[in-house]
Image (spheres, rainbow, N blue to C red):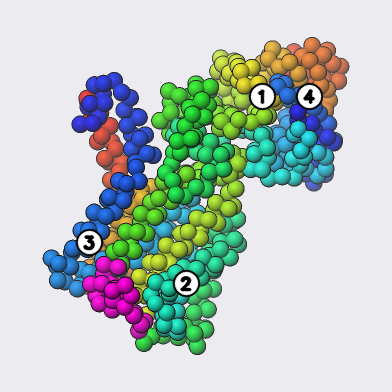
């Protein structure tokens, strides 16, 4: 269970995250939406330790993550993928996976053995299978297509076997068809891996169709939370964000 | 031929290459190292030339230094402009211990490495947090600091005269380092052992952690890697091998001079890496041999040494845009791919 309690972060005078309190139940799939500058990415950065919160708690199964370093938080089981695929360009897909498992097994500073370690092989294989990257194992990450790079980014988070997976716009920069393929993949991963998934998404069609729960952020605050039906009918959300059909499209 | 066979059995070509790239067994490296050492060791039996042996000893000193710099530059993406300080530190540390205490050579060797570890840890702790250009300049600043300390602390270091009067080299385990051939074989052994150890570092899980940090340090921290610690570790390890290079140099000239700790040594290290290339493990070794040959021939022919060297580096930097070994590997790869496609 991931519980956010009174989380706040300001940049100068701007409150990027303002007293956010939220619960993400184990095994839930939640979409975070909100207009540009609503503080969605900041929210992710706070949870994963990229930014230190000014106040508040981030409780993962009761342990406070607030103020810990990113490597520390990853080890507790919160993994993330990035809006712009964040990968290791010169490593192959296979090497990337093997090295990530190595890091997760706390063997990243082993000097006396040769890479790759035998005990990392199965998990690396499994993650590549899950994301459909096994056929491209020997491709250098830099030569992968944009979509495959996004998948590799997610694989990097998933191979660590996180309890909570945060996906910052998994469909960013993709064409319509590719978006649906990606989001189906995300949903499939959520269903098969039984982990908590939180993702940021701009495409309202996708959000309303896929996510059982939605959180709407606006100016760093929670505007509304609930099921797609509730959000669709929520007055405040319509006024601030969804607006008319036209506005909804503009937000995409 | 292997490609052709792989093609016929329908095996994807990539797999063979992947195995070659990441799973070459350790014993093969050791065998290559032993073979190289064997060839070098019998050299004096066939060539009486003292100049040749001197050349190889200098190659050992600078090869260890340049390859260790590549662990930082090529593998971790940390461009140090002050790596030469550890070369100087090795030479002075070893020379001083031998002159002042008269302990056996192996003890002085280990003691020098211990001192290097301590100093590199302190300097590294300050430097490795810094990004690119700041890291480069702060390492350079420490280099200048050590150089001026050597110059001004004349009572200990001999100031600008260097450590004079020769370094005593008592016989140990039947090895007499004042004997030219003994010194030569020892230098070769140190070079081969050093290269094998550095190769092991580069191919270990830690070596891949370094590559990840070079490619994307931020992402590395989000898969649970303590980037600062890894950078500090490789900074200290690289310093140890640079220091060993300095020790070989001190043994060779039987002294230590302030130039060993001057920034131009760091510059030469970078230059060697550019010449040989940083994408292969042996690139810096090839660069070392190239630079020393260039150095020896050009200084014999003309006094305008700097101009010639400048032209060569321009040729590599602007003409090839990579080091010699990078170029060779790429050319070989293309040829192999070409053969594979035809098959």
Looking at marks 2 and 3 on the same chain, the residue that comes earlier in the sequence is marked by 3
**Residue marked by disc 4:** A216
Query: Residue at 55% across / 29% down in the picture?
Result: A155
Identify the image quadrant of residue B91: bottom left
Nearer to us of marks 4 and 1 is: 1
Labelled disc at residue B40:
3
Helix or strand or loop: what does disc 3 sit on? helix
Q: Is residue B333 left or right of residue B259?
A: left
Residue B195, quarter of the rendered image: bottom left
Give the numbered dot on residue A62. Answer: none
Q: Nearer the viewer, residue B86 or A75?
A: A75
Instruction: Report whether A245 appears left or right of B238.
Output: right
Between circles 4 and 3, the one closer to the viewer is 3
Does the rendering let one see residue A116? yes
Q: Secondary structure at mark 4?
A: strand
Residue placed under numbered mark 1 in the picture: A195
Residue B273: in sight, yes or no?
no
Given residues A180 and A198, the one toward you in this image is A198
> Hey, which residue is sitting farthest left in the picture?
B46
Q: Which residues are magenta?
A: B166-186
In whole angstroms, how far apart are the C-alphas of marks 4 and 1?
Answer: 22 Å
Say left or right for A219 vs A104. right
């Amino acid at each position: 269970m991931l519980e956010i309690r009174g989380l706040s972060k300001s940049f100068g005078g701007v409150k990027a995250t303002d007293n956010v309190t939220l619960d993400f139940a184990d095994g839930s799939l939640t979409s975070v939406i909100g207009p540009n500058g609503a503080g969605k990415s900041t929210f992710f950065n706070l949870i994963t330790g990229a930014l230190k919160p000014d106040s508040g708690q981030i409780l993962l199964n009761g342990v406070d993550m607030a103020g810990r370093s990113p490597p520390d938080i990853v080890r507790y089981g919160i993994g993330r993928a990035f809006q712009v695929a964040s990968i290791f360009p010169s490593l192959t897909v296979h090497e990337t996976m093997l090295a990530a498992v190595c890091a997760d097994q706390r063997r990243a500073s082993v000097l006396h053995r040769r890479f790759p370690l035998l005990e990392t092989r199965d998990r690396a294989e499994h993650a590549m299978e899950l994301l459909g990257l096994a056929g491209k194992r020997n491709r250098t990450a830099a030569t992968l297509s944009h979509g495959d790079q996004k998948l590799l980014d997610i694989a990097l988070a998933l191979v660590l076997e996180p309890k909570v997976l945060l996906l910052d716009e998994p469909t960013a920069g993709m064409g319509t068809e590719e978006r649906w393929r990606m989001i189906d993949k995300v949903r499939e991963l959520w269903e098969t891996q039984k982990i908590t998934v939180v993702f940021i998404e701009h495409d309202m069609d996708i959000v309303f169709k896929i996510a059982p729960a939605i959180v709407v952020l606006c100016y760093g605050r929670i505007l509304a939370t609930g099921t797609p039906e509730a959000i669709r009918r929520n007055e405040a959300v319509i006024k601030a964000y969804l607006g008319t059909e036209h506005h909804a499209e503009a937000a995409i | 031929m292997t490609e052709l066979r792989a093609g016929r059995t329908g095996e994807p070509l990539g797999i063979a290459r992947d195995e070659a790239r990441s799973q070459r067994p350790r014993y093969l490296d050791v065998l290559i190292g032993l073979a190289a050492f064997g060839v070098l060791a019998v050299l004096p039996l066939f060539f009486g030339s003292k100049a040749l042996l001197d050349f190889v000893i200098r190659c050992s000193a600078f090869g260890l230094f340049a390859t260790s710099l590549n662990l930082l530059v090529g593998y971790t993406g940390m461009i140090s402009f002050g790596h030469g300080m550890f070369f100087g530190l090795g030479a002075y540390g070893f020379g001083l211990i031998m002159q002042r205490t008269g302990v056996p050579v192996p003890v002085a060797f280990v003691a020098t490495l211990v001192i290097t570890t301590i100093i590199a840890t302190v300097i590294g702790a300050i430097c490795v947090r810094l990004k690119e250009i700041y890291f480069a300049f702060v390492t350079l600043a420490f280099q200048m600091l050590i150089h001026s300390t050597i110059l001004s602390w004349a009572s200990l270091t001999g100031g600008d005269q260097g450590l004079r009067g020769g370094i005593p080299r008592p016989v140990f385990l039947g090895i007499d380092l004042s004997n030219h051939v003994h010194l030569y074989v020892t230098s070769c052994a140190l070079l081969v052992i050093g290269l094998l150890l550095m190769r092991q570092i580069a191919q270990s899980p830690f070596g891949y952690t370094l590559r990840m940090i070079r490619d994307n340090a931020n992402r590395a921290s989000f898969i649970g890697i303590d980037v600062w610690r890894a950078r500090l570790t490789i900074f200290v390890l690289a310093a140890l091998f640079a220091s060993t290079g300095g020790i070989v140099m001190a043994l060779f000239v039987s002294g230590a001079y302030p130039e060993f700790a001057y920034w131009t040594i760091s510059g030469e290290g970078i230059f060697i890496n550019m010449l040989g290339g940083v994408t292969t493990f042996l690139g810096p070794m090839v660069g070392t041999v190239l630079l020393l040959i260039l150095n020896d021939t050009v200084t014999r022919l003309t006094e305008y040494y700097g101009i010639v060297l400048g032209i060569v580096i321009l040729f590599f930097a602007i003409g090839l845009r990579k080091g010699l070994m990078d170029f060779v590997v790429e050319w070989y790869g293309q040829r192999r791919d070409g053969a594979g496609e035809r098959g």
